[in-house]
Image (spheres, rainbow, N blue to C red):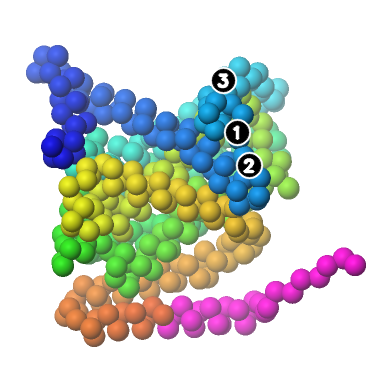
Amino acid sequence: MFSKLDQIFVVLQHWVAGFVPVSLQPIVLALVGVVGIVVVFPALFALTTVFERKGLGRIQNRLGPNRVGPFGFFQPVADGIKALTKEDVVPFNADHFVHFISPVVLLVAVFMGFAVLPVGRNMQLVDLDAGLLFYFAMGASSELAVFMAGWSSRNKYSLLGAMRAVAQMISYEVILLLSSVAVVMMTGSLSLVKIVEAQSQYTWGLPHWYVFTPWGLLGFILYAIAATAETNRSPFDLPEGESELVAGYFTEYSGFKFAMFFMAEYLAMFSVAGLGATLFFGGWSAPVSALSFVPSWIWFIAKVMVAIFVFIWVRGTLPRLRQDQLMNFAWKFALPLTLLNLMVAGLWRFMNPGVVRWVVCFAILAGAYVLMARVGMKREKFGPRSYRYAE
């Protein structure tokens, strides 16, 4: 019963392909998979916009959307209709072709990343031996799309926002990539399917997830910070800083083009959350062996949604950083820690299992963190924050 439920989408995919000749079945199988990705994740995006607005409303002691439909859940439909019917305004001096194509390039690049993510057992569109490499190659394309949007608008605020975004995304993409290298070192493969399979074993009912190791925990923390910056989420939303840049690189976009940027940002959030779950939390594997009967795709979606709610929580909690703080943190703190984590991952791989391995690896990482934090605070002259109130 549960095994059939686990593979229900795979069975449905092959059932649809059974209506065409054998020679065309691979193409139909791929098309059905693409349709599944294009339907499921935008639907989750629509729900997430409601959850985020309601969640931020509760954090800020207000209600959030509650008028359109039951409990306000039809608000995304109203927003979509509004975006479709709004006038598409393009600046007279803009490069019209580049201005038009940039949101399309961004959305396509984000969707391409989903192609290699294993969302369940036997549920990945393409199982590439270098799936992780393909994922990061597609992610790098988003930087080009963002700069195209800012440059083509012929607007100083858009250009500054695009330059901010590219500088930020390149800086934190290095950390994102290097934090994933430790997982590749342990697994010995760039295939995301094999990375999940390597974490799908259990000891005393507990999983062998990489996050439950010293190098895995630090790698995940650095990955989560870099992923937040890559998706331009608070407190790293400087490319869209309303207070100084109006809206950043998409200032001159309206109507459905703006909606495409909006959707691409949320889909990128789903994508990096899914990759984080795959690399550090066992992907579609259950958190304990006793729950392995639950369909694998449910576990994957659950992990992604937990990550999304953490994104929302962080957005409603932390203030925006300054640009110098953002760059200093990336190059002076996070990157050295990421490189040290690679060394510790290699040490963990070749040391004998036992308590000594845990103590040595944890001591190295904890000592480096404390030392860098202390030295960095003294060098930057950080001190206790003081508050002054108008009388």
The residue pinned by badge 2 equals 63
Residue under the point 57% across and 78% down: 376
Instruction: Give percent across and percent down for residue 38.
Output: 37, 28
The residue pinned by badge 3 equals 81
User: Is residue 368 a member of the stretch shown in magenta?
Assistant: yes
For the residues labelled 2 and 1, the Cα–Cα distance comes to 7 Å
Q: Which residues are magenta?
A: 367-391
Residue 192 seen by the camera: no
The residue pinned by badge 1 equals 66
Q: Residues within 10 Å of mark 3 (few under 14, many from 20)?
A: few
* The C terminus: image quadrant: bottom right
Residue 21 is drawn in which quadrant? top left
Is the Cβ of the residue at disc 2 closer than 8 Å to that at disc 1?
A: yes
- Name the disc covering residue 259, or none: none
Residue type at numbered disc 3 = Ile
- Tag 1, which secondary structure? loop
For the residues labelled 3 and 1, the Cα–Cα distance comes to 18 Å
Residue type at numbered disc 1 = Asn
- Tag 3, which secondary structure? helix
Chain-order first, disc 3 or disc 2 = 2
Instruction: Give percent across and percent down for residue 310.
Output: 47, 54
Residue type at numbered disc 2 = Leu
Residue under the point 62% across and 45% down: 57
Q: Residue furthest right?
A: 391
| Figure check: 231 above or below 47 | below
Residue under the point 26% across and 29% down: 33
